[in-house]
Image (spheres, rainbow, N blue to C red):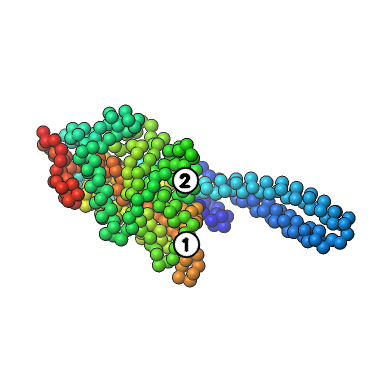
């Protein structure tokens, strides 16, 4: 959420942000709603002041007839004020709704574009494996090696359901433990976060109201989050941190859920696009300083790249175009891993920063060295997402004999250098 004072003083900038992000938002409609809210607020405040004055007159009146006249005036004033208060309530609700739709201002370096196909490669790393055989896709590798069951997964869980078992399950646990060890050594605080969250948590992080269709909702009106970013940011809701605590770095693990409402016909088989998955997420709060946010954004992206290098997975980093940014994101990188069976890169990580867009909604502040309270800046980055990362990990490490080589960094966690049924 942006400050209304900033919006009023920078209407053209906000309108340009909406255009670049391809968001339907009319800044003049918000300004008109704010004007109406302010006008009604003044009317109500004036009538409250008048009501207070009448109360004093009633208290000072010595004559019963005068007192009764003041009481009648007070009664009429109260009725009128109730009408104005109801109008103010409706105007405020309309203003608040529009405020939740205001897009954050993207960084000047964000490329133009209409969709993710317009994202621009920043760099790539690693050698794509050259196979002397036709590489198998991850579904064939998982089934051949008894690492997953999609048929029973669909029977038990429905469309996009899956079971990971045997080495498939062990590999997932190994990746999670490796990821946590990796980030704890970098000074991140570990956290296990809940998936079940209240609506306020999703409003605060910017996933609502626009993302309603992609969220699972309980019969009690709560939601299942699609990333640990949501509960972790809400963990600090209404908190006031000290400058000495910043940057606060969290590595959080949680089950995640997404309906994939807009992905009809896409990746309907396998592990690329599932309803239930598990993520380790980097979440950071820092000082309200653009340069610090930029530096930490690059740092978080580098962390994810280092993890991919440790796993020896070829990848590319792309800068997301305006249309591929979320409402609150200032800038975003995607990391895409090489998938041999598809002969293309597929997304495995996203790295974003938000300035104070989320912290204003969640009321997360810190006191600077002068004791002044400011809204913190927030950032997040996928550290590791499973089961999606199993796709490039299995495909890039398959061998002609049917075995799958374990990346050396995972050997201590799995206790073996390869797995799978050899031909």
Image quadrant assignment for residue 258: top left
Q: x and y percent of residue 359 in the render?
A: 47, 55
Q: Which of 350/229 is in front? A: 229
Which residue is at the front of the view, 335 or 57?
57
Residue occupied by mark 2 = 198
Crowding at label 1, few (<14), some or many (≥20) Cα neighbours within 10 Å? some
Q: x and y percent of residue 402 in the render?
A: 13, 36
Q: Residue at x 28, y 60 (%)?
A: 186
Tell me the quarter of the picture where residue 389 sits: top left
The residue tagged with tag 2: helix, strand or loop?
loop
Residue 267 percent across, percent down from the top left: 32, 34
The residue tagged 1 is: 240
Which of 119 and 315 lies nearest the eye of the viewer?
A: 315
Q: Is residue 195 left or right of residue 51?
A: left
Q: Is residue 125 in sight in this rendering?
A: no
Label located before the other in sequence (1 or 2): 2
Disc 1 is placed on an element classified as: strand
Query: Which numbered tag is attached to residue 79?
Result: none
Residues under labels 1 and 2: Cα distance? Answer: 21 Å
> Horizontal placement of 404 versus 120: left or right?
left
Quadrant in which the C terminus is drawn: top left
- Residue with the most extreme bottom position: 370
Which residue: 34% across, 32% down? 157
């Amino acid at each position: 959420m942006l400050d209304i004072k900033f919006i009023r003083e920078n209407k053209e900038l906000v309108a340009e942000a909406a255009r670049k992000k391809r968001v339907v938002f009319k800044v003049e409609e918000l300004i008109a709603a704010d004007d109406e809210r302010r006008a009604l607020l003044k009317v109500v405040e004036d009538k409250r002041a008048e009501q207070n004055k009448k109360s004093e007159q009633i208290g000072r009146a010595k004559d019963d007839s005068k007192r009764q006249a003041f009481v009648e005036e007070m009664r009429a004033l109260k009725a009128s004020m109730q009408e104005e208060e109801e109008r103010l309530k409706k105007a405020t609700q309309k203003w608040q709704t529009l405020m939740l739709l205001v897009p954050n201002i993207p960084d000047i370096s964000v490329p133009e574009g209409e969709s993710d196909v317009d994202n621009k490669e920043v760099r790539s790393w690693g050698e794509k494996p050259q196979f002397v055989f036709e590489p198998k896709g991850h579904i064939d590798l998982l089934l051949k090696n008894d690492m997953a069951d999609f048929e029973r997964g669909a029977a038990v869980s429905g469309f996009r359901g899956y079971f990971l078992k045997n080495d498939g399950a062990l590999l997932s646990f190994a990746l999670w433990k490796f990821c946590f060890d990796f980030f704890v050594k970098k000074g991140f605080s570990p956290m296990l976060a809940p998936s079940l969250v209240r609506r306020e948590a999703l409003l605060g992080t910017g996933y609502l109201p626009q993302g309603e269709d992609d969220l699972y909702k309980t019969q009690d009106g709560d939601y299942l989050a699609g990333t640990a970013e949501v509960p972790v940011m809400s963990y600090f809701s209404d908190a006031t941190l000290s400058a000495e605590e910043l940057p606060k770095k969290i590595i959080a693990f949680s089950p995640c859920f997404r309906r994939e409402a807009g992905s009809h016909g896409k990746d309907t088989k396998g592990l690329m696009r599932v309803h239930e998955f598990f993520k380790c997420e980097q979440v950071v709060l820092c000082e309200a300083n653009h340069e610090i946010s930029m530096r930490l954004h690059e740092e978080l992206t580098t962390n994810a790249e280092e993890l991919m290098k440790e796993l020896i997975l070829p990848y590319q980093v792309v800068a997301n175009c305006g249309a591929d940014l979320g409402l609150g994101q200032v800038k975003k990188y995607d990391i895409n891993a090489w998938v041999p069976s598809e002969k293309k890169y597929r997304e495995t990580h996203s790295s974003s920063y938000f300035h104070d867009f989320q912290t204003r909604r969640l009321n997360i502040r810190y006191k600077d060295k002068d004791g002044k309270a400011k809204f913190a800046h927030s950032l997040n980055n996928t550290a590791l997402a499973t089961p999606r990362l199993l796709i490039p990990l299995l495909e890039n490490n398959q061998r002609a004999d049917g075995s799958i080589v374990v990346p050396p960094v995972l050997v201590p966690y799995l206790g073996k250098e390869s797995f799978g049924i050899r031909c």
